[in-house]
Amino acid sequence: MNYEGFLELIKKRRSIRKFKSDPIPDEYIDKIIEAARWAPSGGNSQPWEFIVIKKKELRDKIAEIAQEQYAITHKMEMLREPKLRFPKYTTPPAGKPGFATAPIFILPCGDTRTKEIYPSSMAMTIGDSIFITTMANALIYMILAANTLGLGAQQVSVIETPFAQAQIKALLKIPKEFMVYELLVIGYPDMEPPGKTMRDRNKMVHYDFFDVSRY
């Protein structure tokens, strides 16, 4: 792929929040995870484990856990000054979340013991940051891979909150040493995503020094 093709791919990427229930070929799932396997990781630690969730009863339970957290998020958001409230969370959640219809959930889990691979000075200071970046790398590789296959994807961050994570770890029998990262839901889109407003590139790039006149 040349640069133009790559840029076109990332420009078209959007978070999909409603999916068709059509099944996804196992071959596609394999390709998505294969892409994640090659993501950069701190110290080449490769801490990832990927739980592919196909059973509807498990997906429904995870969607229910997420919905509970959305309700808490709404309540907290309404305590902020009106001008600071995030629009998505000003309305109480109703019914199942839109992503619940997606036929496949992929849950990346990170083995926190792999932080011991990092140089000791980094492990003791920025080890957590390196670990999170490593997990994020795998997730974005999966999202882009899904897009190349004609699939839509959404990363569900709310499942990282402590109570949601505890429930999901119990539900899926995940060992305590593993951190649940953002859930990836994938499927064929059942919506037309809105356009994306982007900041002017010239207003975010600095050369040699930070241009404080733009601060």
Image: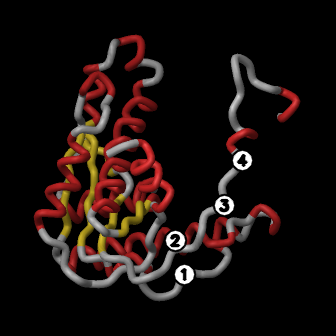
Precedes in sequence: disc 1 or disc 2: 2
- Rounded to the nearest whole Å, what is the CA distance between mark 1 and mark 3? 25 Å
Colour style of the rendered protein structure: secondary structure
Position of the N terminus, as image quadrant, is top left
Q: Quadrant of residue 105?
A: bottom left
Residue at 32 percent across and 71 percent down: it is 62
Residue tagged 3: 197
Rendering coords of residue 67 (x, y %) = 45, 75
Residue tagged 2: 70
Residue 56, compared with residue 183, is above or below; it is below
Residue at 41 percent across and 36 percent down: it is 133
Which residue is the extreme one toward the bottom?
95
Residue type, numbered disc 2: Tyr
Residue tagged 4: 200
Which residue is the extreme one toward the left?
26
Residue type, numbered disc 4: Asp
Residue type, numbered disc 3: Thr
Precedes in sequence: disc 3 or disc 2: 2
Mark 2 crowd level (few <14, some 14–19, many ≥20, 10 Å Cα): some
In the image, taking residue 63 as reference, residue 201 lies left or right, namely: right
- Rounded to the nearest whole Å, what is the CA distance between mark 1 and mark 2? 7 Å
Mark 4 crowd level (few <14, some 14–19, many ≥20, 10 Å Cα): few
Residue tagged 1: 93
Q: Secondary structure at mark 2?
A: helix
- Rounded to the nearest whole Å, what is the CA distance between mark 4 and mark 3? 10 Å
Q: 192 or 131: nearer the eye?
A: 192
Residue type, numbered disc 1: Pro
Precedes in sequence: disc 1 or disc 3: 1
Label 3–label 2 contact, CB within 8 A: no
Q: 68 or 158: nearer the eye?
A: 158
Q: Quadrant of residue 23?
A: bottom left
